[in-house]
Amino acid sequence: MNPAPSIVVFTTLSGAGYGVLFWLGVLRAAGLVPVSPAFGLTALVLALLLITAGLLSSLKHLGRPDRAWRALSQWRSSWLSREGVAAVATYVPALLLGLALLDGNQPLATAMGLLAAAGAVATVWCTGMIYACLRTVRQWHLPMVPWGYLVFAAFCGATILAALAALHGQARFVAMLAAIAGGTAIAMKRAYWDAIDAPPPAGTPTIESATGLGRIGPTRPLDPPHTEQTWLTREMAFRVARAHRAKLRRLTIAGFALSTALAVLALPVPGALSALALVPAAALAIAAMLVERWLMFAEATHTVALFYGGPA
């Protein structure tokens, strides 16, 4: 699949923003991050900026962005619509959280923080299900895909929140969460690559089953369906070279591992000094996620590619 920059940026930034919002709501209620209004408002504003930037980026992928609101009407059957509804709904408790922090209303801030955290989980899950529900893309139609979206959002969110908490002198617990989430993200990504690199399961479409010519033996196209590139070949049959794929995989794991290592190194460092490790850790996590998101699209192939002589 063609890795559109707008969708790569959307899934990376919005995932990181929802991760920050989730950890802020949960950890603030438990007293495991600074409870000062300044910290809460800073983290909340950063989370909403990331979420909004990601959502605005996703609009660039639409032919008619002015009609994006219509996508909200199909929530009964479309994960894309459910994602939009969840994203809009999450703004309500998030904004009320900000008002409660400004007013100093701690009980309301705790309640709205937890509601915003729940909305963040729901939205990221819907984003993952947009891809996991597509049976025509074997590399996405896996149960681990939406869980991966949650893990990666939690990882990026934890590293960003840990960097902010370090500047307020209370980052040890969040840094530990970032390290755990980073290790989980590495394991999840390796498991995903093992799954898509394995031989396709029985029943996976082939060029023989797609053309109905399997009864007479192996099939291959004599001539391409088109004499030049079309939208289908550009979007659905995108190819990434094997050498580039291997290099980008190593780069993704290296980014995750370095970010995780920096979070671990920050654990014994007292106060704001831990920011010297946690700020680069957050930057590395976001950079690695951009590579991972691009690669996730580039490695996926739509079944329609069979008609162009490509593998399923």
Image (tube, helix red, strand yellow):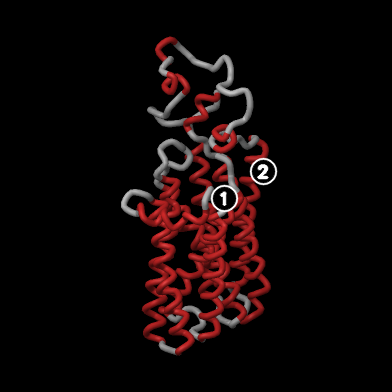
Image-based side of 131 in relation to 182, left or right:
left
Give the image location of residue 16, x and y in percent: 54, 63
Marks 1/2: CA distance? 14 Å
| Residue in view at x 53 percent, y 48 percent | 63
Crowding at dot 2, Cα within 10 Å, few <14 / some 14-19 / many 20+, comes out as few
| Residue in view at x 65 percent, y 70 percent | 279
Instruction: Name the residue carrying label 1.
Output: 293
Quarter in which the N terminus is drawn: top right
Kindly indicate whether the residue at mark 2 contacts the one at mark 1 (C-beta within 8 angstroms).
Answer: no
Earlier residue among tags 1 and 2: 2
Give the image location of residue 4, x and y in percent: 59, 47
Instruction: Name the residue carrying label 2.
Output: 247
Image-based side of 42 in relation to 205, left or right:
right
Q: Is residue 215 above or below residue 197?
A: above
Q: Quadrant of residue 10?
A: bottom right
What amino acid is found at the position of numbered circle 1 in the picture? Arg
Residue positioned most to the bottom? 104
Q: Is residue 66 above or below residue 170?
A: above
Q: Is residue 106 above or below residue 280?
A: below
Mark 1 or 2: the one toward you? 1
